[in-house]
Every structure is written in structure tokens, then in C-alpha cells.
Amino acid sequence: MKTIEEAISAASKCLEGAGVENPRLESEFLMAACLQMPRAYVILNRHHVLADDKIRTLRNWLREREKRKPLAYVTREQPFAISIS
């Protein structure tokens, strides 16, 4: 059984190995889309255990992202992040 945090960490390592520029952020976006929840939910509930079907979905999406398929095409939604400088 994997928690949200464990899945995000594993996904981040996978995306980092594939050369994705912001692997942690993209992992959080993937997880939020997978759970159909806002990114804030993912961050605040990082200790929740994931259902097996969600883990499978995340793995499939990671394979697509490793092939450099755009994040919005993988999740079928456009992530939005605010950058505060």
C-alpha cells in the first residue's frame, strides 16, 4: 500500500530520470488529476493510502510522460501553477 507522498516521490524520481524539468511539481499535478482533486488536497492529504486503481493510472501516465507526451495530453487537463518571485 502506497501513500500519496510515496507515490509522488516515486513518480518524481521517474520523471527526473526522464529529464523532466520540474519532476516534483509535475508529479503533484499527475496525482491531483489522477485523484480528480485539487493539488492542495494532494499536498494536505499526503499520508492517505492510494487505491490500487489510482496507482495503476499513475504508472500508465508516467510511462506516457517519460516518452515526453505533454502533461496536458496525458491528464486531459491543463495544470495551473502560480509562480511567486
Image (cartoon, rainbow, N blue to C red):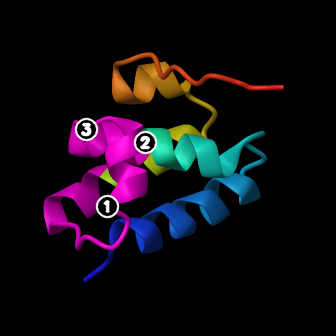
Disc number for residue 30: 2
Res. 17 image quadrant = bottom right
In depth, the one of 77 and 67 nearer the eye is: 77
Residue 6 visible to an observer of this rendering: yes
Q: Is 38 colored magenta in this rendering?
A: yes
Disc number lying in front (1 or 2)? 1
* Residue picked out by circle 1: 45
What x and y, as percent, mark residue 50? Answer: 22, 67
Magenta extent: 30-57
Disc number for residue 11: none
Residue 22 drawn above or below residue 72? below
Q: CA distance from mark 1 to mark 3?
A: 11 Å
Q: CA distance from mark 3 to mark 2?
A: 10 Å
Disc number for residue 37: 3
The amino acid pointed to by label 3 is Met
The amino acid pointed to by label 2 is Leu
Residue 60 visible to an observer of this rendering: no
What x and y, as percent, mark residue 42? Answer: 36, 51
Crowdedness near tag 1: few (<14), some (14–19) or many (≥20) residues, C-alpha within 10 Å: few
1 or 3: tag closer to the N-terminus: 3
Q: Are marks 3 and 2 in contact (CB under 8 Å)?
A: no
The amino acid pointed to by label 1 is Asn
SS for dot 1: loop
